[in-house]
Amino acid sequence: MSRARQSEAHQLTDALEMYLKAIYEIEATRGTATVTEIADRLAVKAPSVTVALRRLSDLGMVRYERYRSVRLTKRGKRLARQLNRAYRVFSELFVLLGVPEEIADADACSIEHNIHDLTLRKAELFVEFLRTEHGRALLRAFEDKND
Amino acid sequence: MSRARQSEAHQLTDALEMYLKAIYEIEATRGTATVTEIADRLAVKAPSVTVALRRLSDLGMVRYERYRSVRLTKRGKRLARQLNRAYRVFSELFVLLGVPEEIADADACSIEHNIHDLTLRKAELFVEFLRTEHGRALLRAFEDKND
DNA sequence: GCACTGACTTAGACGAGTCTAACTTCTTTA
DNA sequence: TAAAGAAGTTAGACTCGTCTAAGTCAGTGC
């Protein structure tokens, strides 16, 4: 790993995916994302953002002109949503299992990049199931067992 | 990410952790690991292994002399076991949720590196629980729901 | 006991991602 | 409306992980 490997599916490295997700989240609340906001959110310096934006632009994930603000393309938005979904599913699963939110979030964040669609789908269904009557019962039994 | 970040806990990058785990698994079956075996297992060329071994040696994870074979130190073995445990827990969890083994393995492999101890522990307990009578019954309910 | 072969290492290059320092562009405001 | 300051970019350096090509070591067979 760490060889900055690209996913087969969309050609993005983990790092680029993080930028994409950050932009998505900032757009969701602010409407549009700036370099500084992205840098702050990822705890990274501005020049790193500039480099990432150029690459994301080349890959058709963002529309971006120098000194102007950034917007996700349709394709970028779709992928970001996918990442976000993976993130939500796993952080929620971990919380349901009793992991504190902060830790669950961090772990979900590192999982979201390389998880297979099918695994994600199963985990998602399982989280949904855990919210039903049946599922709740199961979680109660699990908790009772571990005190 | 992808900046080849090191874990706070043990100073190892994801890539080095992969080498460590490979050595651990080879040692388990062959007693001792060679550069070529490690390279083959990780689908990497021999020079990459040499570099990794030097770093792992500097970090006290393997005992290694040029042109001689490799062995994990106590510390290296402990960490490798930890990685292996994370791997097993998640691949098993995914299989229990209905993910085919091959996919479950690949996903667990990418998760094992950055997962928090507590999350791992909870997941582990949960997998154990799913193997009980009660757990099995609820898994059946989950499966029935998704056909 | 020496040469050959296969295992291993070294050297050098490259891509990705990050940084700091210096420069450019934009915007705000007096 | 022009100057100051904020935002953004470029240049250049570094690390990590990978590769290929070329060199070194060690064990085997004769």
Image (spheres, coloured by chain):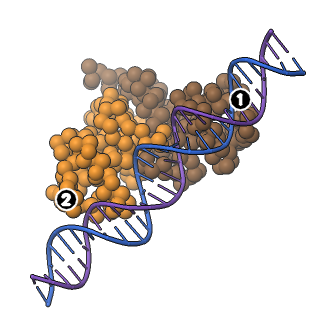
Chain colours: A brown, B orange, C purple, D blue
- Discs 1, 2 touching: Cβ within 8 Å: no
The residue labelled by disc 1 is A32
Is B96 located above or below residue A6 in the figure?
above
Residue A64 lies, in percent from the top left, at: 72, 40
B76 left or right, relative to A36: left
Q: Which element type, helix, strand or loop, lies under badge 2?
A: loop
The residue labelled by disc 2 is B69
Q: Is residue A96 visible?
A: no
Instruction: Please report, as a chain letter, where disc 1 is located.
Output: A
Same-chain check, marks 1 and 2:
no
Is disc 2 surrounded by few (<14), some (14 to 19) or many (20+) residues within 10 Å? Answer: few
Callout 1, which amino acid?
Thr
Q: Give the residue displayed 41% in from the left and 49% down from the top.
A: A1
- Nearer to us in this view, D9 or C24: C24
Instruction: Please report, as a chain letter, where disc 2 is located.
Output: B
Q: Give the residue displayed 56% in from the left and 27% down from the top.
A: A41
- Nearer to us in this view, B104 or A40: A40
Q: Give the residue displayed 39% in from the left and 41% down from the top.
A: B111
Residue B54 lies, in percent from the top left, at: 28, 51
Is disc 1 surrounded by few (<14), some (14 to 19) or many (20+) residues within 10 Å? Answer: some
- Nearer to us in this view, C17 or A10: C17
Q: Which element type, helix, strand or loop, lies under badge 1?
A: loop
- Nearer to us in this view, C22 or B94: C22
Q: Give the residue displayed 38% in from the left and 25% down from the top.
A: A99
Is B117 located above or below residue B107 in the figure?
above
The quadrant holding residue D25 is bottom left
Residue B60 lies, in percent from the top left, at: 22, 42
Instruction: Give the foreground label among 1 and 2.
Output: 2
Q: CA distance from mark 1 to mark 2?
A: 56 Å
